[in-house]
Image: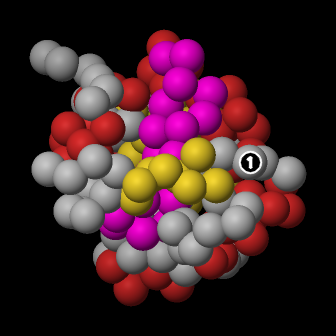
Amino acid sequence: MSAPETTSAVSSSAAHPRFAEALRELGLDVEIRRFPDATRTAAEAAAAIGCELSAIVKSLIFEADGTPVLVLMDGASRVDVELVRRELGAAKVRRAGADLVREATGYAIGGVPPFGHRTRTRVLADRGLLDHAVVWAAAGTPHTVFPLDPEAVIRHAGGTVVDVREQSK
C-alpha cells in the first residue's frame, strides 16, 4: 500500500469540500490523510492508518421512527439497535439505506464524517470512543481520514455520550 498524502484541511481539497468548509467554520486545522485505496470500512481504515480497529470512528445513520439519527461507534464494535431504540424512546429503529444516508449527511456510505453534514440530526456517541486519546474518522470521502481527540469529535458532532455498543454474549 502506498504511503498516505498528508495535507492541511484548510488549504487542501483532500477532504470533501463540505467537510473542509465545516472544519473552517469550526476553526479546526486537522491533518487530512488521503489514501490511494479506499478506506470505506473500519478495518480498511485501521490497516491503512496503522492504528487499532477500535480507534476508528464509524459514523452510522439509523432511521428512528422515520427520522435520521447519527450513531458514532468505535470500529471494533457493533451498534445494539435495541439500545439505540430505548435511548431515543422510538418505536422502531433500523439502519438507514444509502439514499437516506446521502440525503441526511451529503456524503456516501464509507465516507461519512462525524460532523459537517447537510442536515442537523440527533447524535449518539458510544462511550467506548472515549477509551482512546486520538480517534480517526472519515473526512467526507472513502479515501480520506483525520485524527482528533474523541471528546472534540463528540462535541463538534453535537453528540450525547451513551452506551449503545452490542455486548458479547
Residue 12 left/right relative to 73 = right
From the top left corner, tell me how far across and down residue 115 is, in percent.
64, 57
Figure quadrant of residue 94: bottom left
Figure check: 68 above or below 148: below
The answer to whether residue 86 is above or below residue 95 is above
Q: Residue at x 31, y 27 (%)?
A: 51
**Above or below, comparing residue 46 to residue 95 in the picture:** above
Residue 166 visible in the picture: no
Which residue lies at the image location 66% right of the left edge and 45% below the top edge? 30
Residue under the point 68% across and 27% down:
151
Magenta residues, start to end: 132-149
Asked whether, in this view, residue 3 is left or right of residue 153, the answer is left
Q: How many marks?
A: 1
Residue of label 1: 29
Q: Is residue 145 magenta?
A: yes
Question: Camera-side residue: 157 or 163?
Answer: 157
Is residue 148 rendered to the left or right of residue 156?
left
Which of 127/156 is in front?
Answer: 156
How are the residues colored? secondary structure
The percent coordinates of residue 25 (x first, y second) are 85, 62
Residue 32 seen in this snapshot:
yes
The three-letter code of the residue at mark 1 reads: Asp
Residue 96 lies, with reference to residue 91, above or below; the image says below
User: Taking 118 as reference, is 107 left or right?
Assistant: left
Question: In the rendering, at what x and y percent does residue 18 appear?
Answer: 65, 76
Of residues 2 and 71, the one drawn nearer to the viewer in this rendering: 2
What SS does tag 1 mark? loop
Task: Give the quadrant of the C terminus.
Answer: top left
Q: Quadrant of residue 130?
A: top right
Front in this rendered view, residue 121 or 108: 108
Crowding at dot 1, Cα within 10 Å, few <14 / some 14-19 / many 20+, comes out as few
